[in-house]
Amino acid sequence: MALLRRLLPGGCAAALAACLVAGPVRAEQRTATAEDDIKSAFLYNFTKFVEWPPASASEPFRVCVVAEPAFGAAVDRTIAGESAGGRPLLRVTPATPEAARACQILFLGRMENDRVERWIAAVRDAPVLVVGESRAAWDHGAHITFVLDDNRVRFDVNADAATRAGLSVSSKLLRVARNVTARRSA
């Protein structure tokens, strides 16, 4: 510490020493970013513009998150005390892709890119709104995918896939999407 004090001015030595003692920060320990907060706000707002089949009012509305813990924390802050259709919102981390069938929303973070196909296949015929943040999620059938467009968080909607899952996406949501895959006529 004495050497650091001689080499670095003022409080810089103490700050650097604290960093060295704390050790490297792993990716899963990162703090939530403004982008995380915006995406979690979008997830909450999707509950207002997507219709799910009727469910028991006593059951929580499950927002399942398979992403870095910092994103889960952002979702927790956003949905605290909120409800959807009279049902309290609850963030869950499903243990397996099959367990995600109990979700109403399934968010798949970038860290799941190599398993995204398995997650989406597990809920394909269930009324679960699949939201991703990667091209892989879109390519495998996610209903909504976040994209960065000119440093703004935007989203694309695959209305065909949502309809096949038994979900009804409001035209209001479709109007604000960056791109929409049109519904096919029967």
Image (cartoon, rainbow, N blue to C red):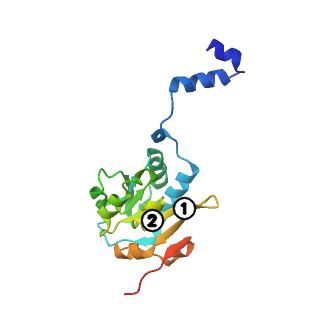
Instruction: Identify which residue, 41 or 154, lies in the foreground.
Output: 154
Badge 1 amino acid: Val
Taking the spot 49% from the left edge, 56% from the top edge, the residue there is: 40
Q: Count of labels shown? A: 2
Instruction: Identify which residue, 34 or 125, lies in the foreground.
Output: 125
The image shows residue 58 at horizontal and vertical percentages of 30, 62
Which quarter of the figure has residue 53? bottom left
Taking the spot 29% from the left edge, 53% from the top edge, the residue there is: 96
Residue under numbered circle 1 = 147
Badge 2 amino acid: Trp
Q: What is the residue that sits farthest to the bottom in this orientation? A: 186
**Could one spot residue 58 in this view of the protein?**
no
The image shows residue 183 at horizontal and vertical percentages of 44, 81
Could you tell me which quadrant the C terminus lies in?
A: bottom left
In the structure shown, which secondary structural element does the residue marked by tag 2 occupy? helix
Could you tell me which quadrant the N terminus lies in?
A: top right
Residue under numbered circle 2 = 138
Taking the spot 46% from the left edge, 68% from the top edge, the residue there is: 48
